[in-house]
Image (cartoon, helix red, strand yellow):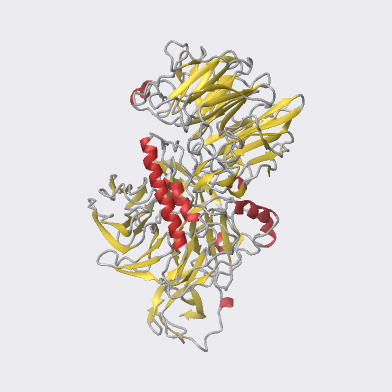
Amino acid sequence: MNLKLIFGIGFTIASLYLNAQEVPKSTGSKGSKINKKYLKHIQDITSTYQKNVQLAKQNHQKPPDEYYLQDFIATMDPETGTVHNKNYIELEKKVENGKFRPDKSLKLFNGAGGGQASKNITNLWIERGPYDTGGRVRGIMFDPNDPTGKKVWAGGVSGGLWFNNDITNANSEWTLVDAFWSNTTVSCITSDPNNSQIFYVGTGEVETGDFSGLGIWKTTNGGSTWQQVFNTESGYASNGVKKGIYNVPAIKVVNNNGVSEVYAGVSGTYLGDAGTFSGLNEAGLYKSTDGTNFTLVNSLLSTATRGYDIQDIEVGSDNSIWVSTRRSSFSGSTSGGRIFKSTDHGATFTNVYNVGNNSSRVMVEVSSTNPLKAYALMQGATSAEPVRIVKTTDGGTTWISTNTAGSGITLPNPVDTGQPDNDFTRGQAFYDLVLETDPANDDHVYVGGIDSYKSTDGGATWTQYTKWSNNNALNNTNISLVHADQHALVFNPAHPNQFVMGNDGGIFFAADKTNLAAAAAVQVRNRRFNVTQFYHGTLNPSATSANEEMILGAQDNGTKKLSGAVLANNFYTSSEVYGGDGAYTAFDDQNKYLIASYVNNYHIIFNAQGGYYLLATAQRDAGLFINPLAVDRNLDIAYTNANASSATSIVLNRISGLASTPLNLVRSQINIATVAAGEFVTDIFVSPYTTASTTLFIGLSSGKLYKVTNADAAHATTTINYNFGGYISDIKLGASENEIMVTVSNFNKTSVFYSTDGGTTWVSKEGNLPDIPVKAIFMNPHDNNEVILGTYYGVWGTSNFQTASPTWALYSDGLGKFKVNHFDYRPSDKTILAVTYGRGAFTTKVTNPVLSANDVQNTLLKNQVYPNPTRGPVHIKLENGKASDIEIYDASGRLVLTKKNVKSDEEFNIESLGKGDYVLKAMQNGAIIHTSVIVRK
């Protein structure tokens, strides 16, 4: 569990971001000179981040999320300092119209894809888990078209929109709607009382600023298809604030004599993933009478032209509209802490409550039967009053409050001794607040923070009915164990005794609201609700897909292990290796140890003797939030980034002795280079081809690439003399250290670079790839024309990588168009792992390489293989005289022998092979330069 804090204070708008402009993708260039404009953007953003952290600490509020700072730097346009999320919407339209459809099968996917099946490719990627972990949920709705009251809709903040056809059944699985919802943060969902086929979904998580939304989405056929009905990006205001509808935390539809009036609450914020203040000018309450066109409600404005930042909307049984507010990111704004009410369909609004704290987040709840009775749950007036609950029985004219002794209403008192008596949110009212009344009895009130509480006397007393752990006094309570951080509670209209909860752990179901004092009263409902946000993952080289073991680092849900035999649903059994936030992972090739990670330099080694230890000690708080790690499996040495993004030197931690028994870790550091602030380590890759020492490739945010030889001892550093022009997101090698692939993840940059001479010269392999961030690359080890990319819009592949301009297509069936952070590969069974941020883990397999005599090239006049036939010894003499990698295939086309770096006319032996015909393939820098049939006699 990761208990979040709040970025809850107003800041002066910094003029860091320029207006977006249509420019062609820029490319890298010769020379190591970096893009000064891009570096200045990084320095300005990092500086602003650090100042805001200090301000937040001084005000006991949440600092900006460091991961989303990293993510923004990784994707922003280097020229303008902005991101282009609108690209996803435009790309989705092209994909829907058939563009980027594969027309060829790839051996990378067991030969799947292309041909006649290209319109409906199946089994490219197989989902592996976790099966029942879940993730953060704010939007829940029972389907009004299901008379049984069993179907439920829910949205993940980064995992899209889902439905479950029978929430009452613990074995019922969730179904993902359309994969494009991966790029849509679901914050709320509601239906039209006049037409049950019409739903509205609001997007964007304003509570944290972690995820920007894409306006409002609407269905008119019960969820079968969806359309965007509210604008997203619309340029920049004169002060540099991004314009658009990015956060819609509340939507309600009112039946006004048969006319459906849609009310949408919009807020602005500092968006961590957009790296800028966004939507501040568009904040306010909006209204639509056609469900498509929305206008700002002018009767509820905080200034002459701008509305309040809206948090919640409720509708009374008399159609009165209650609206609560939250803080605005405009410095000096008086937005937060208020409740407004309208009894004339929005023509006028009256301020019926003000807590006196402009940064207060307020949730309001109106009785379903008595329009004069309402409750509100909010951040209190001062730091001495973290939370306040208020109640009115006269329509908001007067209120009783928990900050007044003897008022008749109190705060819940947590059972856990680790939580303050006056704060059941434990400092997180900015983030987790739930308030609902029983539709059948408005004296029955439900609130949530870290845990959940119920009152049966209108808030006078409370009983705790969920617990996030068995810590301290909680161990002796007979109540349900439910994930922490509550965000939603919805009663079942068809079966009023039932309700569903949403929190950081996914979905939970209560079958009987009258009997909550039991360990099984509230049960998890996360079957196949896989919205897990993985940063990194590794396959155990010693495992197989039939008896798997992989570890993956997840936001909020620790480091997960997926292991064992394949289950009937193709998932693997899930368990936890380490708690908190997970990050980078690693496995030894001899199965002697594994490495899990928390944030920064909290990398933890688990050895075969059952112990676990920190790799770094004094430097454990250094490095990035999600901090790069790489392991030399040959020498059992780990390398991690040691410095923050603002440092002016590149330093690595080096930890040797990973496989020692008993464990004896030797810690040291390597100084790589002096750099400017804002140039930091983004990727570390260990060459598998140098085995007697360590050769590292290190990528920086500025586009610099370093090669470090002898990194295990006295080392030598070489700067690859090429400016990649942006954030290096991945480095991979082909058939040798001469064949290098580099990806850059920024918008408006060439994303894929390739060298066949060790980095002396580079070519772009961008081809027709759309302008989206690229995070990972992988080349088929047996065919260097086949390459796949992990992007922020699924997996892309090509079958002609060696051409001047490769043709890229979307090879993402099964996985969807989700953010892919990393690929890992296990050569022993040719398994590829795709690690996603929001949809868990997926695998596929490379087709076993098959080569026949028909594939033999007519190169014998230039190159010679002798003796042939042979009893064992073989020489291959190549015209160019260079060394090559040799692969030999049997008569069935199976790879049976591999020899690396064989010199021209050097003898090697195949006497271990049985008698028969074989095909020999010689490769240089991954390219096939000779094939011939040889006979073993």
Q: Is residue 18 above or below residue 425?
A: below
Residue 537 visible in the displayed image? no
**The furthest residue to the bottom:** 861
Q: Depth check: give the residue in front, 326 or 642.
A: 326
Q: Depth check: give the residue in front, 355 or 750.
A: 355
Instruction: Please report the residue visible at 52 percent of the width from the left and 15 percent of the height from the top.
Output: 399
Q: Quadrant of residue 252?
A: top right
How many badges with numbers are in the image?
A: 0
Q: Is residue 336 above or below residue 478?
A: below
Q: Residue 489 placed where, x, y %?
A: 55, 27
Relative placement, left or right, of 379 versus 473 is right
**The furthest residue to the front:** 304
Q: Quadrant of the N terminus?
A: top left
Relative placement, left or right, of 318 versus 866 is right
Q: Residue 463 placed where, x, y %?
A: 45, 17
Q: Residue 699 placed where, x, y %?
A: 40, 62
Q: Quadrant of the C terminus?
A: bottom left
Residue 576 visible in the displayed image? yes
Q: Quadrant of residue 55?
A: top left
Q: Is residue 672 above or below residue 497?
A: below
Q: Depth check: give the residue in front, 54 or 644.
A: 54
Q: Quadrant of residue 11?
A: top left
Q: Residue 532 placed where, x, y %?
A: 49, 43
Q: Depth check: give the residue in front, 716 or 168.
A: 716
